[in-house]
Image (tube, rainbow, N blue to C red):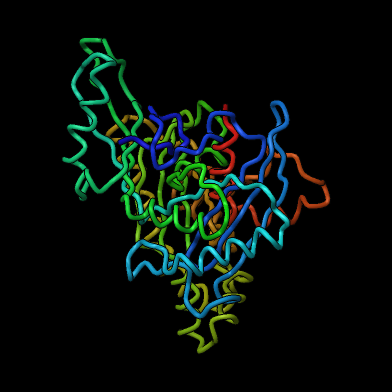
Amino acid sequence: MASNFLSNFNVEKLNIFSNPLKMFFPKKMVGIDIGTSSIKVVEISRWGQGKALENYGEIKSVSLYKEPFRNIEKGSYLLSNYFVSRAIRAVLDEAKIKTKAAIFSIPDFSTFCTSFELPPMEANELKDAVYYNASQYIPLPIAETTLDWKLIGGTPGEKQSGLKIFLVAIPNQIIQDYQQVAQLADIELYAVEAEALGLVRSLVRENKNCVCLVDIGVQSTTINIINRKSLKKSYSFNFAGSQLTYSISSALGLGHVEAEELKNKEGLISSKEEISKTLYLLIDPLVIEVKKVLSDFYQQEGKEVDAIYLTGGTSGLPGLKEYFAEVLKKKVEIPNCFSELLYPPILGQTLEKMAPSFSVATGVALGGLET
């Protein structure tokens, strides 16, 4: 069965998302990003053609529990649906968010994205062909996953035109977890969406540009290639922002909190050789991986990436943007997910600083307001 991932995918109405709100395009939507160490919540409203940031909030796992909200070593599921739902409820209450309709982002390590080619065929044959071929590319039984797909190349009906499909798969168990979290938190699950798709929506606005979007998270990193606002490739890479903090902590014998502060303050441009050398040793494999992805994309598609966008909590590491630009010889930016939303000007500097951490929550919330 097909799911509503709120992209421009070919979508069917799902029985697991039978919420009648979806028929009326709500004027307010809440986006929820359940990360490893924190939960981010964004409420956005639509006023005519414009959209406004109504509210936002974040809660860190250390402020409530000794355990993180997720533990990638124990699998991709939420560590405790009950604790996560309590944390979400706490954020909503503290921020005085009354909107019930919410969209959850699904992290990259809980989804599977791939692309594949199909021979020329008519449009009415495409859906069955996608589902028939999906099992060759997904490392899980089709019966245990929810699928969505998008045509990203070729034209149905043209005999000389092969077709290229972008496929997203999410294990059904994960969707059931999110349903339970929503129920326990007393919110209405409007839909779920792969976080890579939310990032594209909130950060990539130029139709013509080909962009490499690197999302550096606490537990993992995704490298996405977007052309004309359409996600073409998505790769997960075992690089975590938390590794940087741990390495500084070990190298200097510091506690986690002190090492985190030092990392965020000095980063790659630190005058202390122990810090800069330690960070470069960890950052270099990530840069090499990005370079490989760019090279593979050029070999496969014959297209150069115009710019690299950095996002995620580690994207603001001092010196990181400049190092990427120097090594990869590309324009590197840290886009602001709030830049096209209406909000009080006094919040400008605060929102710009926190934007990389809220890109996913913002993107999925925006998806619920699309007509």
Q: Position of residue 111 (x, y in %)?
A: 35, 50
In this rendering, the answer to whether 10 lies above or below 266 is above
The residue positioned farthest toward the bottom in the image shown:
253
Q: Position of residue 36 (x, y in %)?
A: 47, 66
Q: Quadrant of the N terminus?
A: top left
Q: Quadrant of the C terminus?
A: top right
Horizontal side of residue 209 vs 75, given as left or right: right
* Residue shown at the point (41%, 44%) measured from the top left: 224
In this rendering, the answer to whether 127 lies above or below 123 is below
Nearer to the camera, 280 or 60: 60
Horizontal side of residue 8 vs 155, given as left or right: right
Nearer to the camera, 295 or 242: 242
Horizontal side of residue 91 vs 299, given as left or right: right
* Residue shown at the point (32%, 34%) measured from the top left: 166
Nearer to the camera, 296 or 144: 144
How many tags in the picture? Answer: 0
Nearer to the camera, 87 or 15: 15
Q: Quadrant of residue 24?
A: top right
Q: Position of residue 368 (x, y in %)?
A: 56, 37
Q: Position of residue 157 (x, y in %)?
A: 26, 10
* Residue shown at the point (66%, 47%) measured from the top left: 99
* Residue shown at the point (62%, 47%) measured from the top left: 100
In this rendering, the answer to whether 261 lies above or below 127 is below
Horizontal side of residue 154 vs 280, given as left or right: left
